[in-house]
Amino acid sequence: MELKTKIHAEDNRQELVITRKFDLPVELLFKAYEDAGLFAQWMGTNVVKLEAKKHGSYRFETTSPEGHVVFSANGTFHEFEPNKRIVRTFEMENTPFEVQLEFLKFEKLTNDTSQLTMHIVYRSVAMRNQMLQLPFAQGLNMAHNRLQEIAEKLK
């Protein structure tokens, strides 16, 4: 089955470009990234902190059924333009991965459809390639599918 979330990785480049079209108004798509409750639902994680504004920060963590933290990530918002753009850092804690820089662009296609374009920059080509060895594409596609399902109910 073809994934709806597309990941483009050029050889010898330290970046990824990810695109996904949603059957959601751009305002609803953006809300899924700025509302802690919505974000927690579609990402399947606990939002510890989400200051959705320029110079704000965020932190989330995923726990096992026993309550042990199995994944945590954090970052800082460098730009935050509602319904248009987010520029942020993203750091997976307790992993060999270094901080990455993410440019998220939210585009209105029609009144009921929108597109998310994520441009992610890694420190090196090797780090980017290491990320692509993980089930990254499948996980992101699953999360975006949940985003579509959950946000659609808010229409």
Image: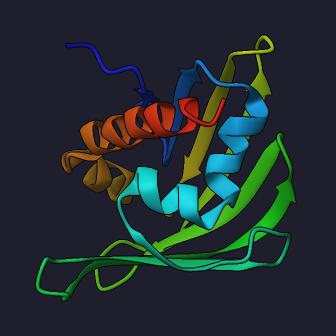
Total labels: the figure holds 0
On screen, residue 60 versus residue 62, left or right, reads: right
Residue 116: percent from the left, percent from the top?
63, 32
> Looking at the picture, does residue 38 appear above or below residue 115?
below
Residue 33: percent from the left, percent from the top?
64, 53
Q: Residue shown at 54%/27% (left/top)?
A: 19
On screen, residue 61 versus residue 79, left or right, reads: left
* Residue 83 visible (yes or no): yes
* Residue 124 visible (yes or no): no
Q: Residue shown at 50%/64% (left/top)?
A: 123
Which residue is more in the foreground, 52 or 65? 65
Picture quadrant where residue 102 is located: bottom right
Which residue is more in the foreground, 60 or 36? 36
Picture quadrant where residue 92 is located: bottom left
> Looking at the picture, does residue 39 appear above or below residue 137?
below
Which residue is more in the foreground, 153 or 53? 153
> Looking at the picture, does residue 85 appear above or below residue 21?
below
Which residue is more in the foreground, 49 or 128? 49
Q: Say which quadrant the C terminus sits in.
A: top right
Residue 75: percent from the left, percent from the top?
59, 76
Picture quadrant where residue 130 is located: bottom left
Residue 46: percent from the left, percent from the top?
41, 74
> Looking at the picture, does residue 109 appear above or below residue 43?
above
